[in-house]
């Protein structure tokens, strides 16, 4: 019985799976697997189709009961949703990973040096590698940070960089997330659920563990404590329960054993930050903040913010508290600045970038702007300050009216947009109903920078669950997969 | 521990205790109602409302089942069972990193169950199965809490919330029944009256425990003594106040005792009143007066907990 349906699953899966020019994570060609996927398909084929469905339901239920959800804004009903989870893991070989890891370490090191430079001497600007106006016109550039010393000169302690695979299988950087990157809790919980649902399969692969992430994060935060605070009190600052990533904030705080605080729990007195506890006020030394710069201190930044702590920025300036990431790191993940990252790497490290960028047109350059305006139907246009798939034009899928609207916007404010070719990034097989179907995926590995740079082997693979879609964001109907990095 | 966290844990426990108490009260009364004439129905349900502290906007309209539905499912009414479960879950969501995963999962599944679309329509209006399942889920939650959460300050705040709510509910329950059961304390119960007394005990889960101490002979003084002064029964006022005071002392121990003199005194006074009084002393006084006095003291303790641990002024804290 099991034998019959199994052969069926493998046959149907192989026969009906449509390949096109995009790189496929599982298939080299029709009927031919990448070798590291063979045991996976073998295992899935040994299960009856209804058993797969049963395990899928068990996984979903586990996420729901654990409240592993994100909040969808602007809806009354059902504002908490589980992040759809696909049963097939995405597998990365040891060799592929070695290159990714090297590239990410190189990138975060260079970007840190860049931030230190632009908030201090500004050598890279004097040497004309990057035009001054690109940096100074960035919305995330913080004048308040000029000349400020941050502990260990580390601006970016926590980073999540989005990678995609081109048609030739090469990993390239799509964007860096240097402010408050999220998703690491899904990486960790996906793995836990996976190990529970497919213990045998998991055991048969040599997958590198990722559980140590929270301990590494804690160590990173501890290493950034202000001078003279040998046993620092570390807290995670969350905007609160209505934030879309609240589950993650609570998860990380619990896994690290630190307090999860909100702005209203903190007070600043004489440039010292305290938290309000049942035994009175307790000093705070390091804040892993998941609140954006703009909202963190109503005295220094947006006065209408109710999420922040009045006086926090002064305490930070005085060196009495560390923030991770530092204020003003957003300048380095501005989408226009992204185009210069290869130059930044060469300038500070005298090395060639290990991971390439996606080709990017800067609309402030007249000839590039001209080219983009003439080819809007082929390109992707992104607003530099937006994230989460908002403020985007995907040329091939757009209407003439949308293109006209974007053309007007670009001409009105060219600094605010970039354009990139439409890349048909790689696809991985997903279980859709009873069948395997290809869906586009990206990869967000997580990088930590404290005593040293660490990249946890894995990351969050996001899946565009709509057939043919290139948008993987959870707010736009994306899902995720467990990501396995093999040790050999 | 963060003040906000203490606040959320305290309320999580209070809301669940309230949901459990309401569920049991409704279950017991729906059951006893089947044995009585319909003329006394109104009296019974008004007494239920009295025992719940006359919840706002909920009125007796002549139909026990519609009253039960309101007290169970109506989320417009903040003390309905479903509202309490939602509030408890919301409080626990604010402190997810403070409670165990097991606790969260138990409470979250209860929440998902009672808020799933169309759930209310699927519950048979005349069956008490749902009420029993709520009580059971909350018992499970309490067991999970006690066995998976570290018995540190957070757990102590849960204890305080649970027992201050229980003490208030028991005092109100006794007050609601007082008029019926203690006007003529010398009388021997007959027929339906026996059922009422049993109902009172069962509303506090006390019937079996009472029988173990006094046998199934129910007398008003003994019932009052048992629910007010018994040292070992978890739903008696004395037990609840003892447990609350014990938890408060643990909290004071962790957070610095000198700050907590007023609270220590308030709790200690109520505790010693219940420990050193006899049922004769109580019966010689105005029983309703005694119960109302206990309720007032519970409110004062609640207020003082707030001033001390949650809502204190920054200036005082810096000076201290």
Image (tube, coloured by chain):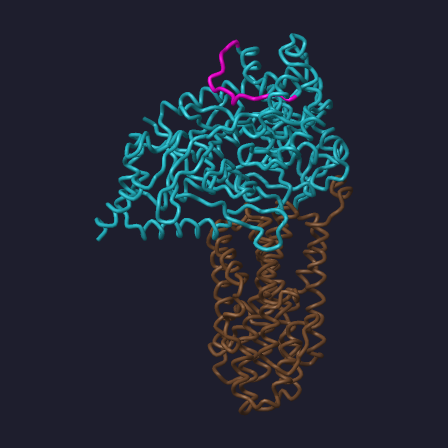
Chain colours: A cyan, B brown
Q: Quadrant of the C terminus of chain B?
A: top right
User: Horizontal and vertical percent for residue A199?
Assistant: 32, 43
All told, the count of numbered labels is: 0
Q: Is residue B291 above or below residue A265?
A: below
User: Horizontal and vertical percent for residue B68?
Assistant: 59, 75
Nearest the camera: A20 or A14?
A: A20
Q: Is residue B132 above or below residue A365?
A: below
Check if residue A341 falls in the magenta segment. no
Nearest the camera: A284 or A137?
A: A137
Furthest residue in direction top, as rendered:
A127
Q: Residue at x 50, y 24 (%)?
A: A173
Q: Is residue A431 left or right of residue B4?
A: left
Nearest the camera: A368 or B190?
A: A368
Q: Does any portion of residue A222 appear in the rendered image?
A: no
Q: Is residue B194 above or below residue B202?
A: below
Q: Is residue A9 left or right of residue B198?
A: left
User: Horizontal and vertical percent for residue A218?
Assistant: 53, 32
Q: Is residue B243 left or right of residue A297?
A: left
Q: Quadrant of residue B13?
A: bottom right
Q: Is residue A77 left or right of residue A426?
A: right
Nearest the camera: A405 or B19?
A: A405
Q: Residue at x 56, y 22 (%)?
A: A360
Q: Does any portion of residue A90 appear in the rendered image?
A: yes
Tell me where the magenta segment starts and ends, as one range.
A350-363
Q: Main secondary structure of the magenta part?
A: loop
User: Horizontal and vertical percent for residue B147?
Assistant: 46, 54
Q: Quadrant of residue A301?
A: top right
Q: Is residue A77 above or below residue A181?
A: below
Q: Quadrant of the N terminus of chain B?
A: top right
């Amino acid at each position: 019985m099991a034998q019959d349906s199994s052969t069926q699953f493998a046959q149907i899966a192989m026969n009906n799976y449509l390949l096109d020019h995009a790189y496929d994570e599982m298939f080299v060609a029709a009927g031919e697997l990448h070798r590291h996927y063979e045991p996976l398909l073998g295992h899935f084929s040994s299960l009856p189709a209804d058993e797969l469905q049963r395990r899928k339901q068990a996984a979903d239920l586990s996420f729901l009961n654990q409240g592993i959800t994100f909040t969808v804004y602007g809806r009354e009903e059902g504002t908490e949703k589980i992040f759809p989870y696909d049963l097939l893991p995405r597998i990365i070989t040891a060799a592929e990973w070695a290159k990714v890891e090297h590239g990410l370490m190189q990138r975060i090191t260079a970007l840190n040096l860049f931030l230190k430079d632009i908030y201090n001497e500004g050598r890279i600007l004097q040497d004309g590698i990057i035009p001054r106006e690109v940096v100074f016109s960035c919305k995330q550039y913080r004048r308040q940070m000029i000349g400020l010393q941050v502990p260990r000169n580390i601006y970016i302690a926590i980073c999540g960089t989005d990678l995609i695979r081109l048609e030739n299988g090469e990993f390239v950087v799509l964007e860096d997330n240097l402010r408050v990157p999220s998703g690491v809790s899904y990486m960790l919980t996906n793995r836990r659920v996976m190990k529970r649902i497919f213990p045998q399969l998991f055991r048969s692969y040599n997958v590198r563990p990722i559980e140590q992430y929270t301990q590494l994060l804690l160590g990173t935060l501890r290493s950034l404590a202000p001078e003279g605070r040998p046993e620092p009190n570390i807290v995670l600052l969350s905007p609160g329960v209505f934030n879309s990533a609240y589950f993650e904030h609570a998860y990380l705080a619990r896994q690290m054993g630190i307090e999860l605080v909100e702005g209203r729990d903190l007070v600043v007195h004489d440039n010292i930050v305290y938290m309000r506890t049942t035994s009175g006020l307790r000093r705070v030394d390091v804040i892993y903040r998941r609140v954006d710069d703009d909202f963190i201190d109503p005295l220094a930044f947006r006065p209408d913010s109710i999420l922040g702590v009045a006086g926090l920025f002064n305490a930070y300036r005085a060196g009495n508290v560390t923030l991770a990431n530092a204020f003003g790191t957003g300048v380095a993940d501005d989408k226009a600045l992204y185009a210069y990252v290869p130059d930044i790497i060469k300038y500070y490290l005298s090395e060639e970038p290990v991971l390439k960028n996606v080709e990017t047109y800067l609309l402030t350059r007249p000839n590039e702007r001209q080219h983009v305006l003439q080819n809007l139907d082929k390109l992707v246009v992104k607003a530099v300050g937006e994230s989460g798939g908002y403020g985007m034009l995907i040329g091939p899928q757009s209407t003439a009216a949308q293109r006209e609207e974007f053309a007007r916007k670009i001409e009105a404010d060219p600094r605010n947009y970039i354009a990139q070719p439409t890349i048909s990034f790689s696809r991985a097989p997903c279980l859709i109903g009873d069948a395997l179907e290809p869906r586009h995926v990206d990869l967000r590995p997580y990088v930590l920078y404290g005593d040293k740079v660490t990249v946890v082997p894995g990351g969050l693979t996001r899946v565009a669950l709509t057939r043919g879609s290139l948008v993987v964001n959870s707010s736009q109907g994306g899902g995720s997969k467990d990501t396995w990095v093999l040790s050999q | 521990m963060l003040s906000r966290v203490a606040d959320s844990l305290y309320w999580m426990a209070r809301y669940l205790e309230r949901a459990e108490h309401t569920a049991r009260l409704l279950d017991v009364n729906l059951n006893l109602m089947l044995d009585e004439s319909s003329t006394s129905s109104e009296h019974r349900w008004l007494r239920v409302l009295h025992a719940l502290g006359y919840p706002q906007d909920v009125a007796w309209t002549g139909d026990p089942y519609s009253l039960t539905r309101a007290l169970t499912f109506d989320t417009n009414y903040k003390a309905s069972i479903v509202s309490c479960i939602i509030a408890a879950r919301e409080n626990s969501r604010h402190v997810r990193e403070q409670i165990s995963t097991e606790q969260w999962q138990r409470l979250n599944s209860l929440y998902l169950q009672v808020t799933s679309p169309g759930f209310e329509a699927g519950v048979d209006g005349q069956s008490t199965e749902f009420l029993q399942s709520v009580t059971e889920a909350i018992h499970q939650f309490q067991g999970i809490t006690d066995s998976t959460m570290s018995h540190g300050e957070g757990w102590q705040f849960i204890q305080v919330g649970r027992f201050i709510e229980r003490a208030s509910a028991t005092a109100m329950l006794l007050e609601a029944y007082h008029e019926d059961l203690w006007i003529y304390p010398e009388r021997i119960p007959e027929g339906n009256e026996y059922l009422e007394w049993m109902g009172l005990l069962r509303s506090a889960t006390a019937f079996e425990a009472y029988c173990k101490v006094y046998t199934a002979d129910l007398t008003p003084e003994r019932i009052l003594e048992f629910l007010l002064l018994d040292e070992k029964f978890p739903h008696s006022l004395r037990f609840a106040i003892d447990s609350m005071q014990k938890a408060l002392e643990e909290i004071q121990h962790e957070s610095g005792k000198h700050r907590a003199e007023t609270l220590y005194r308030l709790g200690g006074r109520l505790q010693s009143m219940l420990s050193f009084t006899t049922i004769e002393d109580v019966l010689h006084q105005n029983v309703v007066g005694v119960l109302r006095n206990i309720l007032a003291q519970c409110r004062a303790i609640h207020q003082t907990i707030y001033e001390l641990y949650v809502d204190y002024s920054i200036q005082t804290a810096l000076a201290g």
